[in-house]
Image: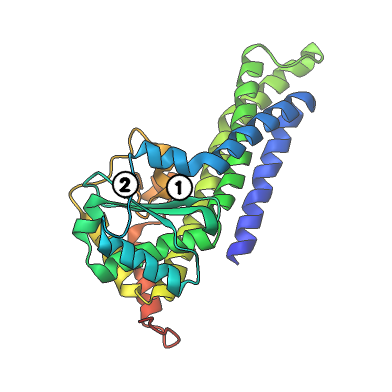
Amino acid sequence: MNTLKMTLIFLVLMLLFIWIGGLLGGTQGMVIAFAMAMVMNFIAYWFSDKMVLAMYRAKEIKEADNPRLFRIARAVATKASMPMPRVYIIPTKGPNAFATGRNPEHAAVAATEGILELLNDDELEGVIGHEMAHIKNYDMLIGTVAATIAGAIGILSSMARWGAIFGGFGGRDNDRGGNVISLLVAAIVAPLVAMILQMAISRQREFKADAEGARVTGKYLGLASALEKIHRSPVQLNLDDRPATANLMIANPLSGKGFTNLFSTHPPVEQRIAKLKELAQSPYVTYAR
């Protein structure tokens, strides 16, 4: 069902893209805008790990630097039958963690100083399992594809806005009024819909990573406890100046409630905790040692 949902979301994004391109009156502008978006996301896909790690001043560690984190990361990688990722520590007290990298062979897991102080070993293993699940499921690739389409829609929407300001792109005078209105609708509605759908993809991947990571480590309740501790922590990782990285984090301080939840990259933490506790009580669950 989740695969079907994501396929439909990608289809809607592509239809939005094609629709705006048609409003602009031809394929040349659409091709140029799409090419620009592809180039930007190509760079992001190949170099995003280095960019985001540098952004947070993350420091790569060896086992001697932090035996506890390194040991847990190695144990999770072994249980998941995955290559050992590079391990980083972020110098901040805000408790959080993220994974980055284009595939399991080029992956990194980063944890803040705050999360290492806040969580016990079971909780930390649950968190690292969640991040390793993101790596295993190629969530960075899925996010990049979604960002490519959404980015292209954003560029075309900007072109549509300018087209509306200057009265449309050619055509007969009696057609221009309707064209201007259509361009305004495209400029306002299309990027909003694209953003909501992109966030929906991210939220689906979070649920899947929770379940997969907990299944591999056996730390269903550990991960649930970790999420609750992070959520209730009086100190949060400040993402106000880096909102684009919110989708990477295991817990998103930018998350909202009600209508604003549409714009959140993560499901409500209460739902995630409830699902993990439900899975922990399933008779089909086996706990890893």
Percent x, y for residue 217? 39, 74
Q: Is residue 19 left or right of residue 254?
A: right
The quarter of the picture where the N terminus appears is bottom right
Colour scheme of the picture: rainbow
For marks 2 and 1, give the CA distance.
15 Å
Name the image quarter holding residue 4. Answer: bottom right
Q: Residues within 10 Å of mark 2 (few under 14, many from 20)?
A: some
Above or below residue 8? Residue 288 is below
Residue at the image position 33 percent from the left and 67 percent from the top: 72
Percent x, y for residue 67? 26, 63
Q: Is residue 278 visible?
A: yes
Nearer the observer, 245 or 268: 245
Q: Is residue 43 left or right of residue 250?
A: right
Nearer the observer, 177 or 269: 269
Q: Is residue 47 left or right of residue 223?
A: right
Please identify the residue farthest to the right as the structure is shown: 172
| Closer to viewer: mark 2 or mark 1 | 2
Q: Earlier in the sequence, mark 2 or mark 1?
A: 2
Disc 1 on helix, strand or loop? helix
Q: Amino acid at mark 2?
A: Pro
Residue at the image position 53 percent from the left and 51 percent from the top: 140
Percent x, y for residue 277? 34, 74
From the image, tell me which residue sits under label 1: 262
Residue at the image position 65 percent from the left and 36 percent from the top: 38
Q: Is residue 264 visible?
A: no
From the image, tell me which residue sits under label 2: 253
Nearer the observer, 107 or 4: 107
Q: Amino acid at mark 1?
A: Leu
Disc 2 on helix, strand or loop? loop
